[in-house]
Image (spheres, rainbow, N blue to C red):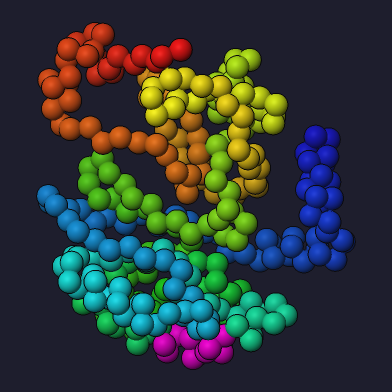
Amino acid sequence: MKNDEKILKIVNKRNLNANELERILKSVENAAPQQVQAFTDYFERKVKFGVFSDCHIGAKEFDEPFFKHMVKTFKREKVSRIYQCGDILEGMSGRPGHIYELSEIGFAQQFSKAKRLFKLFDCPVFGIDGNHDEWYQKQNNQGVIIGAELQNQVEKYTNLGQMEANIRLGRNVTMKLFHPNDGTAYAICFDDKTEILTKKGWKSFSKVCNKDLFATLNKKGFLEWQKANDFIENDFEGNLLHFNARSFDLLVTPNHRMFVRRYPNNLLQSRKKFLIFPTKSHRRVEFNW
């Protein structure tokens, strides 16, 4: 019963009629199952690589001189490989007016341009397809997988799948190529069970409101209770990133920005005098109240 109520809530929220809902269900039934590709690309010591995404080749907004500038920059910096994160082509969505936003119309023209440009790279390029690339697979049942076609016709390009891929860079290092799909791309959130400290105590993100005051740390090291500037609530489909250690446990969407700090390898020796327990790795944390 709870599941039925949840479905009804989603339908009402999206203002879907019966025909629209039926088309969505049919598209899900016909969709091929997606598996996250695992690819190993070990580095011995140091490596310099390039990353780019969302070319949208075929759109009038695509900047070919800037693309060529990127290629020259990668060459100048002597990167040894390049990773590409989806939406190689603009695609053909079929929505009203989209055709007027295109400089190249249709698969043949857009792909021909992409093939010419990707041949400019002088080192291996590994990439995934994005949702715009998938239009040529799903629209009118064309079945064209852009990354696979590019791999067949561009010597240095390797297709790692669609929407996401995991790349093992070392024994304990994995890099994820990820292309969020439409609305999911704007979901920059914690999950509903992660808690945040408010003036009334710890609350899960699903239970906070605009009246809550949240614990913050200002530049002078003083703890302050402040209201949130904004609240973001988005639907998300995909895998969340789990950060778990002795003092924290949280889930975030892959594109969520994090406040992090890089520590030197000799942290324990150089900061022993600041540690409460010298045999432990955490340091003393003090706030001015």
The relative height of residue 28 versus residue 203 in the rendered view (above or below) is: below
Q: Would you say 218 lies left or right of 284 here?
A: right
Q: Quadrant of the N terminus?
A: top right
- Queried whether the magenta region covers residue 236, the answer comes back as no
* Residue range corresponding to the magenta coloring: 102-113
Pick the front one: 63 or 95: 63
Residue 198 placement: quadrant:
top right
- Residue for point 35% across, 87% down: 116
Q: Is residue 141 left or right of residue 86?
A: right
Looking at the image, residue 132 lies above or below residue 49: below
* Whether residue 74 is situated above or below residue 288 in the rendered picture: below
Taking the spot 68% from the left edge, 62% from the top edge, the residue there is: 29
Q: Residue 201 in the image: state x and y as whole percent.
A: 60, 15
Question: Residue 14 versus residue 35: which sits nearer the camera?
Answer: 14
Q: Nearer the viewer, residue 221 or 158?
A: 221
- Can residue 217 be seen in this snapshot? yes
Percent x, y for residue 204?
61, 25
The structure residue drawn at horizontal position 42% and vertical position 39%, both measured from the top left corner, is 258
Q: Residue furthest front?
A: 220
Q: Is residue 46 shown left or right of residue 185?
A: left
Instruction: From the viewer's perspective, tell me whether residue 42 is left or right of residue 259.
Output: left
Residue 118 visible in the displayed image: no
Q: Position of residue 32 (x, y in %)?
A: 58, 64
In percent of width and height, residue 180 lies at 53, 57
Count of picture labels: 0
As drawn, the residue found furthest toward the right would be 18
Residue 103 in the magenta stretch? The answer is yes
